[in-house]
């Protein structure tokens, strides 16, 4: 599926029901990719904002109780972006955390043009997430090659 299809569907949205349908299509597109199908979905949002849909959800990979990588597809103002952030869970409670912040240098936004496919975007998001994970492993003294291999294996 191309981003062009999702943006065309977004342009036709007039009601909250349309926005919900767009969210469902977006979520299905990402959950159908080999790269991200294993990740659980959280924090779905879909509503109309000044006659345009705003839809997004999160796919989260819990690296540990202290680090979680979030991949968030979002359609807003007629544009599609994919956010990839590795968060430091300050209270060490993993997905139950009430206090977190983006890890420095691990906050990326992929702005997608019409020709990109969801599969291509999912692959790129996964690459960024793995690079972030490997960087966390390297911080404790593990060599880059080994850190990257371990990060890839966990994804």
Image (tube, rainbow, N blue to C red):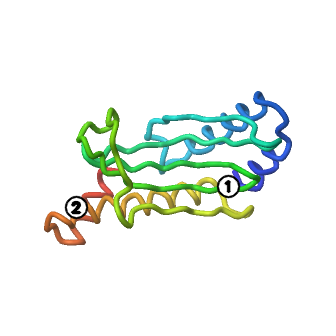
Q: What count of labels does the image hold?
A: 2
Disc nearer the start of the sequence (1/2): 1
Give residue 38's quadrant in the image: top left
Give the distance between the C-alpha atoms of the residues marked 1 and 2, in whole angstroms.
31 Å
Q: Is residue 115 left or right of residue 32?
A: right
Is 59 left or right of 87, judged from the image as shown? right
Query: Crowdedness of circle 2 by 10 Å Cα count: few (<14), some, many (20+)?
Result: some
- As drawn, the residue found furthest toward the top would be 17
**Pointer 1: what residue?**
80
Q: Position of residue 100 (x, y in %)?
A: 34, 46
Residue reaching furthest to the bottom: 144
> What is the x, y in percent for residue 96?
33, 32
| Residue in the picture at 20% in, 66% down | 139
Q: Return the residue at label 2.
A: 137
Residue at screen point 62% across, 48% down = 74
Residue in the image at 59% along x and 54% along y: 119
């Amino acid at each position: 599926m191309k981003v062009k299809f999702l943006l065309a569907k977004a342009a036709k949205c007039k009601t909250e029901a349309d926005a919900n349908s767009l969210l469902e299509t977006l979520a299905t597109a990402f959950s159908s990719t080999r790269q991200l199908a294993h990740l659980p979905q959280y924090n779905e949002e879909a509503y109309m904002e000044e006659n345009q849909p705003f839809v997004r959800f999160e796919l989260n990979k819990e690296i540990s109780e202290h680090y979680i990588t979030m991949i968030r597809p979002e359609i807003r103002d007629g544009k599609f972006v994919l956010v990839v952030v590795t968060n430091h869970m300050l209270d060490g409670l993993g997905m139950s955390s009430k206090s977190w912040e983006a890890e420095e240098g691990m906050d990326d936004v992929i702005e997608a043009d019409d020709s990109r496919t969801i599969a291509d975007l999912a692959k790129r998001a996964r690459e960024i997430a793995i690079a972030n994970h490997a960087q966390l492993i390297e911080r404790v003294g593990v060599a880059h090659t080994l850190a990257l291999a371990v990060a890839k294996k966990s994804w």
